[in-house]
Amino acid sequence: MKKHLKVILLTISITFLQITPSYTNEDVSQSGISYDEIYDPIEPINRAVLNFNFFIDDIAIRPIVKTYKFIAPDPVEKGVSNFFSNLKEPIRTVSFIFQGEFYKSFNSIGRFTVNTLTSLGTFDLASRVGMEKNETDFGITLAKGGVSSGPYIVIPIIGPSNLRDFSGDVVEYFVDPISNNVPNREYIAIGSGLNERVEIDEQLDKVRDASSDRYEMIKSIYYQNRNAQLEEEYIQNLPVPKIYIE
């Protein structure tokens, strides 16, 4: 049932992406990357969902996160974070292949092999030996293909996104080599989600304490972070200028 639902959502998402106008400027379009502009046609619905998410977080998720952070020493938190990050290396490998970034794809699968064999991913030995971590996802893959972000959406429980990135998440659900080949993949998804919630706990507390409109604040932070990721991808792939000294 879950798979059928995600297929339907993916089909709807792709349809909207095809008919949603691009909000990128001319210079950005020439770079081949579709940067995110804020397009929020369903703001009342998004606000209602955000309030629901904060309610669920307050009564269920936040107490778990605070208890975990109080009990777990920093090395344990780091190890758990490394573990879940390592599980994403295979899907990063697939994303890089679709982007034509074959060196980065080999680097990601190499990182997964080294870290899994040495510590089940809890210690990032690969970075120590020169295999640097490169972040990516299918949302970035679609952006590099020129797909516009589409409307901003707030997903129940999950949080802020847009139609393109949500479509990328659905694609990852089906093609992830790890989660598709382990039993009870729902537990991995829940654990990964809680770990991500732990990592943004301090930032979320600051949003709670802010007196301004937290909906607009979260939306702005989301797009700033996403565009920073896209900018980094673009800059990393610029040709290195040759400098001649006579």
Image (tube, grey):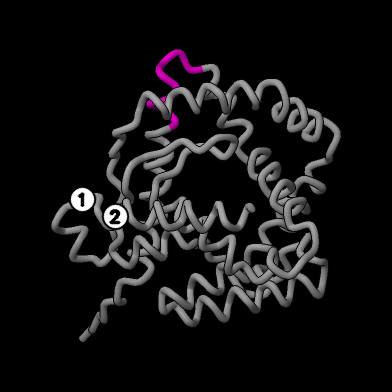
> Tag count in the figure?
2
Horizontal arrangement in the rendering, residue 85 relative to residue 49 (left or right): right
Q: Is residue 35 depicted above or below 239 in this figure?
A: above
**Farthest right residue in view:** 71
SS under mark 1: loop
Q: Residue 163, percent across and down?
A: 39, 48
Q: How many other residues sit within 10 Å of disc 1, few (<14), some (14-19) or many (≥20)? A: few
Q: Residue 135, percent across and down?
A: 52, 61
Quickly name the residue at label 1.
21
In depth, the one of 175 and 8 nearer the eye is: 8
Q: Is residue 67 depicted above or below 17 in this figure?
A: above
In depth, the one of 201 and 38 nearer the eye is: 38
Residue at image location 61% in from the left, 67% down from the top: 176
Q: CA distance from mark 2 to mark 1?
A: 7 Å
Q: Is residue 12 depicted above or below 86 in this figure?
A: above
Residue at image location 74% in from the left, 54% down from the top: 188
Of the residues shown, which amino acid type is indicated by label 1?
Pro
Query: In this picture, which residue range is highlighted in magenta?
Result: 210-218
Q: Are marks 2 and 1 in contact (CB under 8 Å)?
A: yes
Q: Quadrant of the C terminus?
A: bottom left
Q: How many other residues sit within 10 Å of disc 2, few (<14), some (14-19) or many (≥20)? A: many
Quickly name the residue at label 2.
148
Of the residues shown, which amino acid type is indicated by label 2?
Ser
Residue at image location 13% in from the left, 57% down from the top: 26
Q: Is residue 32 depicted above or below 71 in this figure?
A: below
